[in-house]
Amino acid sequence: MAFAPLIQRYGLGILAILSVINLSTAAPFNAALNVADAPCTEPRVRREWRSLNDAEKGEYIGAIKCLMAAAPTGKQYFEPITSRYEDFVAMHVNATGGGVLNTERGFPMGGTTGIHGVGIFYPWHRYTVWQFEETLRNECNYTGAQPYWDWHLDTPEAGGSFVTSPLFDPVTGFGGNGAEDEEDDDEGSRGWGSAFGGFFGGGSGGGCIQDGPFKDIKLHLGPMSTVKVGNERCLTRDFQGASAERSATKANIAKTLAIDTYASFRSSTEGSSGLHNAGHGGMMDVFSSPNDPLFWMHHTQIDRIWAIWQSQSESRLAEMAGTTRAPVTLDSMLWMGFNAPDQPVRTVMDTLNRNGEGFLCYKYDVGIEEFVD
Ligand SMILES: *[C@@H]1O[C@H](CO)[C@@H](O)[C@H](O)[C@H]1NC(C)=O
Ligand SMILES: *[C@@H]1O[C@H](CO)[C@@H](O)[C@H](O)[C@H]1NC(C)=O
Ligand SMILES: [Cu+2]
């Protein structure tokens, strides 16, 4: 999108924000206003986690820890937030609940007003991952692109397995499963901080994670939609490897990529055996899932699947369907609340911003050839 239409759309406020950016690189909004008149010429290349060397992996994890140690910007809206990292968790909780907060009960499940199970699922998460990537770079000196987790590589047919994924390496990765928790099997929806699995219970873990760089972090938002002071707890995981391996087969991914409309592509990938759940190793805490840094690795792969689906026909760069508060069109707004400027869906349709209407500038290292012969 060119500069002039942005001003028309947002009024002069955007000029005020832009002038603040010139003065201060610390402004949290600077990233999203990376609005290019010129199309993207040097896209960042997002690579699969295992193709990063150990120094690059360390740099990424270090940048996340930097965000976890940095001061929050959203505390005046959501009191439990304790870090810049948790700004993103709170934004996701708020958006999942459609912005309707009840401080005692938390948010209602957003239904048609939230960001899951609705047409806006893909563009909202694409914009959010971009914001996160930009924030790592702008506020934590991260120099790489956001990596992704290709869970297909962790299936037996690809020579791997979910539980032995290098993503879970305690030294070069994100650490592994939560401690085994027997209660978890009959208690059902514990949701107590578990971002990966555990929503329905019955996974192989369920307790606090035991190793890796995030072993000692404390969560403050959630569980589920609760947003109140006093919910401090550990990060738990509850792997459900078999169900992840079943969803992430080449045949299943190829079948998904062959769907011919955005509407069915979206509902299929978000459905109960769809790819969105594959990486979560079962279900997860749908509201506060970004509490686990694996969220970003998984959602970048989900974004990649959308980008690959789009790559099959140019018209898909403008294909949107479904609902949120109303039918979703290219002009529907992506609500980011305190954490980033709202943007219309059309600005995030093309990761390479080829028609100049957006601001994204990245691509994935491996495309459809991985799944379709
Ligand atoms: C980023 O790099 C700049 C310049 O070297 C430095 O002043 C700043 O402290 C670094 N920021 C973080 C969060 O490490
Ligand atoms: C919460 O979400 C709503 C709707 O998405 C948004 O309008 C509002 O600004 C958000 N609140 C904050 C504090 O970010
Ligand atoms: Cu989400």
Image: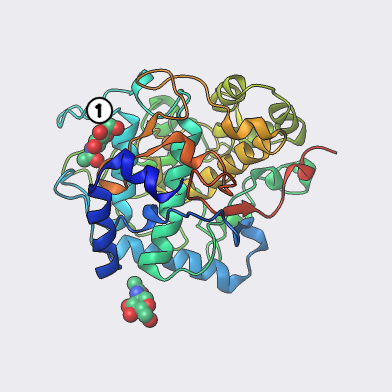
Residue most toward the right? 373
Quarter-of-image position of residue 249 = top right
Is 49 on the left-hand or right-hand side of 325?
Answer: right
Is 257 on the left-hand or right-hand side of 237?
Answer: right
Instruction: Name the one closer to the observer, 111 or 82.
Output: 111
Instruction: Name the one closer to the observer, 277 or 124.
Output: 124
Residue sitting at x 53%, y 32%:
282
Residue position for label 1: 107
User: What's the amino acid at mark 1?
Assistant: Phe
Quarter-of-image position of residue 344 = top left
Residue 118 shows in the view: yes
Is 32 on the left-hand or right-hand side of 14?
Answer: right
**Residue 205 coordinates in the image, percent (x, y):** 48, 42
**Residue 288 coordinates in the image, percent (x, y):** 35, 39
| Residue 7 position (above or below residue 273) | below
Instruction: Name the one closer to the observer, 304 or 239.
Output: 304
Residue sitting at x 32%, y 45%:
7
Residue 27 shows in the view: no
Q: Quadrant of ligand 2?
A: top left
Crowding at mark 1 (Cα within 10 Å: few <14, some 14-19, many 20+): many
